[in-house]
Amino acid sequence: MNILEERKLKKEIIEIGKRLSSLRLVAGRSGNLSVKLSDGNILVTATQTALGDLEAKDILKVDLTDEADLKNKKVTSEFPLHSLIYKNFPHKAVVHCHPMLINAYFAVYSDIKALTFETKLYLGNVPVVEQDTPAVTKPELVIEALKTSNLVILKNHGAVAVADNLKDALYLIETLEEAVRTCAVARLFKKDILDDLDKELKSALSSEKSYDMFSKEHIQAIVDLVNKDEFISKKGQEQDLTLQLAIKLDASDKVYKFVFEKGKISKLEFDDAAPFVISAPSQVWEAIFLGKLEPFVATTQGKMKLKGDLGKLSRWYVPFSRLFELFRQVKIK
């Protein structure tokens, strides 16, 4: 075991705890943090510790493969959740905290109103898990939610964020807290701005027919919708949407290249020889086609892989956002 690695990560946990406290994202002895070491063990905060006043002795090393190692260690009561996250995902850091504004907002609403591009790009649809007790007694529900987002809300309890490091997990929570603050201020100017959040969504599907996901018929149906869409056509001409974009299903030979010319898909080809290639496993693509996950968010959170420069692709953010909306309008089986 690398002692220097352990000391470095303990120092980082202490720093993140102080930042959470200074931002009022935790209060008192609420919240907990953990990181995964290179040898597979994890460092996790002890129970009844205040994250804003952590010391090295408050951070415990635990062997995930040895249940006996837990017997004499007073780890956080949320340790089962941390453990299950590391067993199901490759993430190396978990932040669980109880932000006041986030808790207040999601006590009232079931989704975040995206009023800024940052909210759309980095958060998308934030899943909300119902919470019946002060501690997470059904961590499997959180695990399922984390499959579509690196940030999950525990209703009436707090937020859980996962990432490759503690800072990135914290940034997700900070971004959501700022999005909630923006919604609150916007409502001062326009009282009914959030009124549509909990209304039943209207069906806008173009066809009742459903397709096997990533079949040629499925992708062709999307192409047909794109080429009939007036909004993409208009924005595509205004922004000169001329490029090649491929989408790929991991662990398969299924790949489709859209050849755009001023907003229209002039060709559908079957290779990934393109400056931009978006790839993901089946469960991620399914979440996208069902509208549970936004592709831009999936890319920034690392659930999808992008070959190419996201900054350049973001030049066409508006027409591509519409493109991804049309993805959801073609039913999959």
Image (cartoon, rainbow, N blue to C red):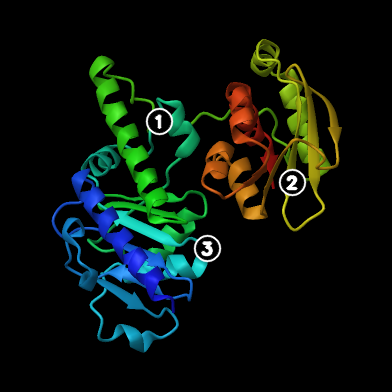
The residue that appears at 73% across and 25% down in the rendered structure is 225
What secondary structure is found at the residue carrying circle 2? strand
What secondary structure is found at the residue carrying circle 1? loop
Contact, CB < 8 Å: mark 1 with mark 3?
A: no
The residue that appears at 77% across and 32% down in the rendered structure is 221
Q: Which residue is mark 3?
A: 90
User: Which kind of residue does numbered mark 3 sit on?
Assistant: Pro
Q: Nearer the viewer, mark 3 or mark 2?
A: 3
The residue that appears at 73% across and 32% down in the rendered structure is 222
For the N terminus, which image quadrant? bottom left
Asked if 163 appears above or below 290 in the picture, the reply is: below
Query: How far across and how far down the image is residue 326, in percent?
Result: 65, 30
Residue 199: give its label.
Answer: 1
Q: Is residue 84 left or right of residue 259?
A: left
User: Which kind of residue does numbered mark 1 sit on?
Assistant: Lys
Asked if 128 appears above or below 227 in the picture, the reply is: below
What secondary structure is found at the residue carrying circle 3? loop
User: Which kind of residue does numbered mark 2 sit on?
Assistant: Lys
Q: Nearer the viewer, mark 2 or mark 1?
A: 2
- Visible in this render: residue 324? yes
Which quarter of the figure has residue 262?
top right
- 264 or 12, nearer to the observer: 12
- 152 or 237, nearer to the observer: 237
Residue 248: give its label.
Answer: 2
- 268 or 162, nearer to the observer: 162
N-terminal label among 1 and 3: 3
Residue 2: give its label.
Answer: none
Of all residues, the one furthest to the left in this rendering is 28
